[in-house]
Image (cartoon, grey):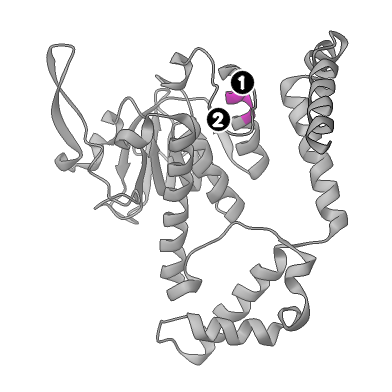
Amino acid sequence: MGTSEPTSDHDVIVVGGGPAGCSAGVFTARYGLDTAIFDKGSAALPRCAYLENYLGFPAGIAVNDFTALMHAHATEAGCDIVEERVETVTQADADAKFVVETQTGAEHAATYVIAAAWYDGSYLRGLGDEDMFERQEHHGEIEERFDPEYPDEDGRTAIDGLYVASPAGDRSAQAIVVAGHGAHVARCLLEDRRSERGYSGEVAPHYDWLRSDAEFAGEWAERERWRTWFDNEIEADLSEDRLTDLREAYIDEAFDTRRTDQEVEAATERGLRRLVEVLGQNRLLDVIDNGEIRERANELEDTETTHAN
């Protein structure tokens, strides 16, 4: 580790820009944490010829398109995508922050690190915990590799602030599974951070969930009802001032998730527009011009009519 000032300072650095890393980054960035995803090096997903089992793509999707959509989503959520390979992760003694050094020699500071690179965990050796690694036979040779059982099932580790979304054993074997695991690990990080602030019980977990107007009808339209619920769910023994601050902050966050029908409609339009922008308008128009989409739409319409009759 060098002695120069870090090039950047983030709340969260994610090492790996595949499904695990991007999914984790979306959750931490949407929560409001300054998040950077470092993505360069060996990856598993490009070995897939075509991705057919990821929900939301009825006939599958090309891996390059899927990667572009992942990165666009992470950027939209507020992540910085840094195309540099991480060489080492160490911890500064002064403030226990992590220092992430890339192949260019640049150093980046972070409060949290989420490991999300499936193939290689050697960049974590600088943290000095030999329990991270195990000896394995690989193609007839004995190698030391990152032990996927080093973190617990929630991605937490013995090193405060270090979380592992990948490698995660069998959970890393399918894109859709590892994406879910990345989100789960990020939510555990957020729960730990909220617990440090004083949240506990059922108010400690963070739910990234938008609510419709209908959810705030009747008694739930009043802050007092939320206050009652909060006091019943929190478990920590806090001073009255601290409890009041946390309670009001929690209710503010809840009301910030409220969306009107008009806001949902606008978000829907923006979502579709961004999808077209990432995939390319001309590509989509070419498909329409070739009649493929019209033909498929007509087939679906005929099917629906048959079922209706």
Q: Which of the pair 70/93 is nearer the observer?
A: 70
Q: Is residue 200 visible?
A: no
> Which residues, given as a range, are shown in magenta?
65-69
Q: Work out whether 237 lies above or below 41.
A: below
- Identity of the residue furthest to the bottom in this view: 240
The residue beneath circle 1 is 61
Q: Which of the pair 162/165 is nearer the observer?
A: 165
Q: Residue at x 46, y 23 (%)?
A: 40
Residue 37: percent from left, percent from top: 51, 36
Check if residue 136 falls in the magenta segment.
no
Q: Residue at x 45, y 39 (%)?
A: 14
Q: Work out whether 125 lies above or below 66.
A: below
User: Could you tell me the amino acid type at mark 1?
Assistant: Ile
Q: Residue at x 50, y 47 (%)?
A: 10
> How many residues crowd around disc 1 within 10 Å: few (fewer than 14), some, or many (20 or more)?
some
Q: Residue at x 15, y 42 (%)?
A: 131
Check if residue 68 falls in the magenta segment.
yes
* Label ID, residue 278: none
Q: Work out whether 85 lies above or below 216.
A: above
Q: Are marks 2 and 1 in contact (CB under 8 Å)?
A: yes
User: Could you tell me the amino acid type at mark 2?
Assistant: Tyr
